[in-house]
Structure formats: C-alpha cells, structure tokens
Amino acid sequence: MDFIGGGAKNYTQFLKFLGDKKFLGSPFQMNFPRPNKTEYPDIVPMDKTVRSCNDTDETYRCACVDCGGSCLDLPEVTANKACYVGLLPCLSFAVVIVYSVFIGLLVIAVSGHVWYAKHSRHKAERLRLLQDLDPSDDEDEGDMVHNVSMMDRPTKHYFLNTALDKAFSKLGYVCARYPAITIVTSFLVVVLMSLGWLRFTVETDPVRLWVAPNSAAAQEKVFFDDNFGPFFRAEQAFLVNDTHKSGPGPVMSYDTLAWWFDVENRVQRLRSYENGDTFQDVCFRPTGDACVVQSLTQYFQGDFAHINPKNWQKQISDCANTPTDCLPEFQQPLDPKMLFGAYNESVIDAKAIIVTWVVINHAEGTEEIQRAADWEDSLKSLMLAVQAEARDRGLRLSFNTEVSLEQELNKSTNTDAKIVVISYIIMFIYASLALGSTTLTVKSVLGNPSTALVQSKFMLGVAGILIVLMSVSASVGLFSAAGIKVTLIIAEVIPFLVLAVGVDNIFLIVHEFERVNISHPEGTVAERVSRALGRMGPSILLSALTETVAFAMGAAVTMPAVRNFAAYAAGAVFINALLQITMFVAVLSLNQTRVEANRVDCFPCVRVKRSDSSYLGYAGGEEGSLQRFIRKVYAPALLGKKAKVAILTIFLGFFAAGLGLFPEVELGLDQRIAIPTDSYLIPYFNDLYDYFDAGPPVYFVTKELNITERVHQQELCARFSTCQETSLANVLEQERKRPEVSYIAASAANWIDDFFYWLKPSNEECCVDGSKPCFDGRDPAWNFTLSGMPEGEEFISYLTRWIEAPTTAECPLGGAAPYNNALVIDDKRLTIPASHFRTSHTPLHSQRDFIAAYTAARRIASDISKNTGTEVFPYSKFYIFFDQYTTIVKVAGTLLGSGLAMVFVLNTVLLGSIQTALVVTVTVAMIVTDIIGTMALAGVSLNAVSLVNLIICLGIGVEFCAHVARAFTFPSRAVMERAPRNKFRARDARSWTALVNVGASVFSGITVTKLLGVCVLAFTRSKIFEIYYFRVWLALVVWAATHALIFLPVALSLFGGKGYVDPESDGGLEQDLRSRQYPSLLNDDEYDYDSDD
C-alpha cells in the first residue's frame, strides 16, 4: 500500500491519494465526499446484497457458458487405464510370478525325485546282496509276461470307434469297388451345389463388411442419413514443403500462392469424363448458392487479384486471426486449423497448406453418386498431374478423393492375387511330388529305375488338389445360393485353409494305404482301401468335425465379415472331408490298379514291362527316411525323462510369455496397411496424421422430441438460467473442458440457443415483423429465464422462419447457413423428429485415438440420455468402422473359448477319454495363446481380419493335434510292437507309437505344405497380407508344428488317458503271422536297447 496507495491506512485516505492533483497522478483535483450525514444527508451506503453468478435465484443466475460456478461438476471418468506393476502390466506380472513359482516347485520336485530314486536303488542293491535268490523255473514265462508289447497293449474296445471303423471300412470298400460311380456321383453333386455361383456376389462395401446391420452403429448411420442426408464426400489435398534435406520448411511464398490459386481454378473448371459435370454440379451448398471449399484461397473468394504482393503475409495472417472478417462465399468462417498445418504462432510459417473440396452425398446406388464418383476420378487425374508440377517447384502434393480408398483396396487385392496363386501352386506341386515319396526310395529307384514311372503319384496329388478346389466351389455355390455374400477375406483365405487341411488328410490316407499294401498284399484293392479308410476315417472325422464346429461357432457373430467367413470355412472343410473319404478313395483305388498293372503315372495307356509293382520301399526292407529318423532317433530322445522335464518347462514358459503379452496387443487396422505400399494414398495418410491439427466433426443427435414444450427446451439449451444443469449443451460444454478424457475440442453448435437469441428484440436486424423486432413489446417479454420464449405452434412457426433466415453481417444468428440440415421439423405433429448438435473431436493421430474418441462419445451420449430422458446418440463418419472395437475383445474371447469347448467335447466323444481330450484342448489353447503373444511382438493388431485368422489358427491347431491324439488313443499294434523293449511302457509306448505312426504325415503333410505356402506370402506388395497373413500364418505353422510334434507327445505320455484296441490291428494269430511275414517291419537290432535316461 505504501507503493500504490501513498501509505493510506483506510479507504478515505486511499481515495484522497487518488484524487490529489500531482505529477504522474491525477491531472486535476478530485475531492471524494466523505460519508458524513451532516454534510451530505442524502448519501448513505448502499444496503444491497451482492449476488454471485451462480445464485440460486433464476433471475440473477448466469448460464453455465458464462459462469463456471453455475456448471454441474461432471463425475470423474474412470478411464480404462491398464493396470501396471512397475513397468509390467498386471497380467504380465501375475504370469511371471506364477511361472516362477512353478519353476521353483518343479526344481524341488525333480530334486526330490532324483534323491529318492538314488536312495531306492542303493536300498534295493543292499537287499539283493543279502538275499539268495534262486533262479525261476518259469523264466521263459516271466519273459513273456514282462514283454512290453504284451503288457502295454490295450485290451479294451471303444464301441464308437469300432462302429466308426466298420462304417468307414464299408464306405471305403464300396467307393473302391465302384470307383467310376463314386467319382461321377461326387462330381454331379459338386456341380449341383456349384450352381449357386449364378447368385455369386462380392461384398466390398466396408460398412456392410465390418458392421452388423442390426448393430447400434449401423442403425444410427441409417437414421442420420435418412434425416440429415448422407455425410458429405470430402476431397482433400496437402501441399507440403518437406523435399529438402534440411527438413520441412514454410510452404507459402507469393509465387506458390499464385500457382496454387491457378490449380484451384483448374479444379473449378474441371469436367468429369462421362457426364461433363463440373465441381459446381456436384458440390455441397449449405445455403443453396456457393460451394463449400475450405482453402486459404477462399479468404479472397478464390481471386488472386485480391492478393497484394507487398503485404500478402499480413492479409493472410489477419484473415486467419479473424476469420469472420474474411468470410468465403458460403458465409461460414474458416478455421485456420483446417487450412494450415504445422505452424506455431503465425500461419505464414505453416509447413503445409490443406485444401478440402466438399461434394454432396446421396443414397447408395443413385445416379448422383455415380456422377460424383466420375468427377472424383477426373480430380484424381488432375491431382496426379499437379503432383509433378509440385515436384518441379520443390514441393510435394498428396491427396485423397472419396473413391480413392475403395479403388486402392481393390487394386491391392488384384496385386496380391498373383502371390496367392503362386502360394497355392507351390503347395500343390509339393503335395503331388511328396505323395510319390511314400513308395519311392533311392534304393528302389536305383534298383529298378522304371519303378519311378509307375510308383509316382503325381496324378493322385493332382486329383487331391482338384478335390480341394471342388469343395471350395461347392461351398461358395451353396452359400451364394443362400444369399451369403463372398468377401475378399473369403476369396483369399478359404482356398489356403482348405488346401492346408485337405492335403494333410490326403497324406494320411495314402500313407496308411501303403502300410496296408505291405501288411495285406493278398487282399484285393478294394479290401486294402477299406482297411486303410477304416483306420484313418475316424481320425479324419475327428479333425474335420472339430474344425467344422469350431469355424461354425463364428457364424454366431453379428459382424458380417467374420460370420460369412465362418460359414464358408465350415462348409468348405466339411465338404472337402466328405469328398476325400469318397471321391479321393475311389481315385486312390484306380491309381493302385494302375500301379499293379505296371502302367505309367500321368500316361496310364503306357505300360512298363520291367516295373515290379510289388517292389515297394517297405517290402524291400526300407522305410521312409523321415519315418526312420522319427522311430530311431527323434521319438526315443523326445520321450526321455530329462527331455520331458525340459520340454514341459520350455513350452509352459512360451505359454506364460504369450499370456503376459496379451495386454500389448493393440486394437485397430491402420488404413495405410490395407493398401499397396506404392499407393499414392500412403503419403496422404502420413500427412493427415502429421499436419492436420483438427479433429473430425461429431454430431450428438436427438431423436423424436417435443421441443415445443418448455421442459424439453430446457433439456437442450445452455445459455439461459433455467436450462437444466445436465442439459445436452451444458454437458457438452463441460466435456469440452476436459478433452483428455472426452476428446471433445470445440463448443457445440447449439441451434436452440441461437434460435432463441435470434428472437431477442435487441437484435433488431434478425427476427422482424414489419418494421419492428418480433418480440418487441411482447408480454411476457423475452428474458433470460425462458419464460417469454415461444411454445407450441408459435415455436414451430418462428423456428421455420429462423431456419430459412440467411446469415448476414447485421444478423449472424440466421439459421440457413449453419443449421439448414441440423434439424427436421414436423409442423403437423408440432415436434422435432431429429436434430443434431455439431462439435468436433480433438486431433486423432492413431487407431488408439479413434477408438478412445468413439468410446468417449458413446459415454457422453449415454450420460445425456440418462440425465435428461432424451434419446441421444453420437455420430461421426468414422464411428461405424470403429464400432467393432467396443466388443471385439469380448467376441474374440467368446469365439475362441466356445471353439475350445467344442474341441474338448468332440475329442471326448470320439476318443472316449476325457484326459486325452483335455490334453488336446490345452495344447490347442497354448498354440492360440502363443500366436496372440507373437501378434504383440510382430505388430499385428486385433481386428476383424486378425480375428478371422485366430479362428483359422484354432481350427488348424486341431488339425495338427487330432491325428497324433487319435494314434495315441488307438495305437497301431504292428507299430507298437516295434517299440524299444525295457524303455517305453504304457503311455510312453503309445506316445512313441503315435509319433512313429503319424508323425511323418503331420510333418510332411501339414507342416511343410503350409510352410511353403506361407513363405511365398512374404513377397507380397500389400502390407495387410505381409502383416496379417504372412506373420500370423508363419507363427501358426511354427507354434502348431512344435506343439503337435514336441509338446503333445510328451503331455500325452504324462497325462494322456487310457488306450483302446485299434480294430484294424486286432487280428489275433492271423495278424501275428502276417506281421512275421514281413520281418523288415519288425526286425531291427537297434530296437533292443536299454534306457539310458
């Protein structure tokens, strides 16, 4: 006070200090009267209560937009923030703890077991030395009893397997006995089903692909389009100065402006190819006159003559600072954030110029849409030419038209078609050649070269591949006839899926048939085929049925892309299995007849005299090198005690890592991934994220509302004292103040507030009746409490006048320009069927931002509806594409969980063992878990595409595991008797048998085939194929193969269920004699070795 008040001690001294005339003080003397009743009896202190802006009295209370104290404190938003313990997500931390505890317990258990075993051996040795054991007279009998092949051989039959064996044997006999009838009948059925191709249609519309028609987002889009018209079409360009090595710099110069004005004039004169339409014919006109073009050129009405070469920088800066002084022809202020990118204080330093041409939209399929798309194609051609001009000026131009994304997506598909076809061809060639290796060995070919010409199975492989393609054709025809449209995912994935599954079944059937050829050479071809199918048929049924049901579970999802894929995949896999156990079996019998007649493969009319059809690899004392390696090296090493502990530890570690990486999997599908890497849209999307600092518009839409009643007016308004604290406009204003959780960046365009202020009498140039304001002299008068505002028919009458009133400098509150399509008026029922309040999101630069913004808008609309009773929903053009992410995690969990449940149920029924079914289900769950963990590391997001792939992973994971599990449950007696004596007992012996019996088929028939096909996808030009197909499918092949061939046999040897007699191996003495007829199958001096674990 000493400094600013001259040392005043009270208010009178302070007033005197202010009133005294002095240098740097008051220029004249001012004497303030003192409150003295004798000198000034009429001057008394004011005895009034000072009112606060948030007073409870409506007469004095200010609106929320003017007084923060009048605003309702919104409840704190509990953001779905990830739980972390230090740097680790809670789930990852929990997994680490659990796995660490497991490892600790495992170390203790192993150590205890080793100590106990060592102690027991020492004790047994001492007892042996103390005892005088007489040799047994029944030593031979003891040897026989302890023979591993006798003790561990299953003795019980499983009735369902026996029934299936008989059924498949009979089916195989009939198909092999009458191959021509079988083939012709199968072909005719496929042709009949393929007639559905006449109704074949491809769904390319992203909206109908990823959004269920009955979902809230789809219905809201229909409501918005029907009431306000389809959202406008935007053509946007970025002119950027970032071509120099020094980095981005200011893009504007006088010469650049002159050139760009000319470019925009060329756009205005541009005519479409087909109809000759100009921009004026297709543009969006909010006021019915001028087209909407958001560009700095519109500060000057697109006329470069208005630019002063001496102070153009000031002209642009002034317009950017005060947009209302430089209105474009369509009379709406231009936000600088929509026109300039990457600037700090002055727009003159902006590194990008942003231009948006707005084209009116119409209902799909109309002529107007085609005309707009035609003009956009012309714009695309012009912009491609302008790109070259920009390069000559040291600048870079990127652009996008409304039709660009769909065109580039289709271009991506056409580009990748070659890669996909090459992938299929490689799998086809491999399968055809590999099938011949079942009977061709180096020794057999060198001993009799003509054998290769006869024993080759190339045509058999071709037939198998054709059957796969026939099943795809039949599935497409069947579901096309049912009205289910094909999607690009179906066209690209289903053939790969069915080929991958079908080739494995072919290998299993052929390999088993070759074994039967050796064990039962005296039977007819039909009898041998019958035996082979009797053994492999139930295994094929198990895998095919499990996969079909797992895929069919996806049909319950409302998302069309996933639902349609699930239906087509289930149908194709099931039809393929049916054709393989009928048509392929018939082809197999014909091929064997050719072989035994010494006729050349591919040229059956040519007969080789020197060929010996009985000269088979196995009969000659040889077996396949892969199967020999599995029998002699791999299986014994895998099933050792130390190996089991290591394998369990490692694979459970992988499983724990996969679980721990779950929180790291992102949601979304970046548009840049879905298009070719050389697309002109890639730079545009990069510029959009880097330079566009304005968020997309968002509309909060009200449905049927009787706005003519005061209570409903108060549910919407904000600038009047009696508006509800939780009114729509008040809530949006409060949410704007916390953009970090609401993603709302701007105040809402509130039509009802502007309408009421348009009626205000002091706005003499707005609502006028004759020569005076509408509400001048009205009783009750226009006032801040809404008591004088119109209701009923009067409200609709004034509202109709306001919505047609132009926006002018004298009256900027006219509704024609900003609100002409913001509300629907029903003057007959005196209601507003629909209206919207427009605002905008904060800048959104990632998929996570878009998903969070959509989720926040949903929350805000839900809160408004709950608080006001008015039905409100949010709408923005991108919402419909991100609606899937609100439920995709739940949908994925439901689908995969249901699929695993069906895997367990079907395996339990078909294998007759809950334990074995549980082991298979857990193994498949581990495969899927590890793939999801790999997705997190490989940058693969969770979306509809990857969800489809996860369903594929579940189905093919079953394909890898089912055959091993069934070979374990129903072990082949001939193979099991070859297990090393004194080394493998009980479950170990059956695991060894399963590996030897089907391990080679799983590796060569599934793993190698899929690996060859997947590796080709690495050369695709499309990022979506490289990321969502190559990476995921490669992970699938690696994880499924390692789990099926390493982890599953070990898990079955430890936790597998009981075994059953394989009917095809249960032949009694006759079977024993037949086995002894082929000593090469049994005699091996390496079988009789002891355990060295």
Image (cartoon, rainbow, N blue to C red):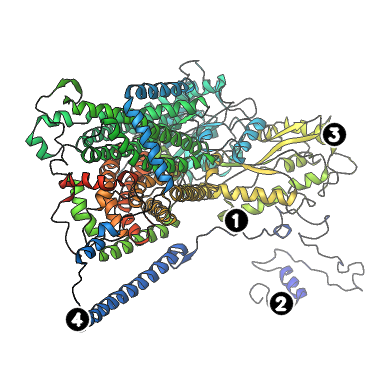
Looking at the image, is 742 positioned above or below residue 375? below
Measure the alpha-carbon separation of dots 2 and 3: 64 Å
Query: At label 4, which amino acid type do we have?
Result: Asp
Residue wearing tag 4: 132
Mark 4 in CB contact with mark 1 (< 8 angstroms): no
**First reached walking from the N terminus: tag 4 or tag 1:** 4
Q: Are marks 1 and 2 in contact (CB under 8 Å)?
A: no
Pick whichever, 1075 or 546, lies toward us. 1075
On the rendered image, what quadrant is the C terminus found in? bottom left
Task: Give the Cα distance between marks 4 and 3.
Answer: 118 Å
Q: CA distance from mark 1 to mark 3?
A: 39 Å
Of the image marks 1 and 3, the number of the one nearer the N terminus: 1
Residue 128 position by quadrant: bottom left
Residue neighbourhood size for the residue with mark 4, other residues' Cα within 10 Å, grouped as few (<14), some (14–19), many (≥20): few
Q: Of the residues shown, which amino acid type is indicated by label 2?
A: Ala
Q: Which residue is mark 1?
A: 738
**Label 3 belongs to which residue?**
793
Q: Would you call the spot at circle 3 few (<14 residues within 10 Å), some (14-19), or many (20 or more)? A: some
607 sits to left or right of 810: left
Under mark 1, the amino acid is Arg
Q: Which residue is mark 2?
A: 8
- Whole-angstrom CA distance, mark 4 to mark 1, is 91 Å
Mark 4 element type? loop
* Among the two numbered marks 2 and 3 on one chain, the one whose residue lies closer to the N terminus: 2
Q: Residue 559's spot in the image, x, y percent? A: 53, 39
For marks 4 and 1, give the one nearer the viewer.
4
Going by the numbered disc 3, the residue's amino acid type is Glu
Label 1 to label 2: alpha-carbon separation: 45 Å
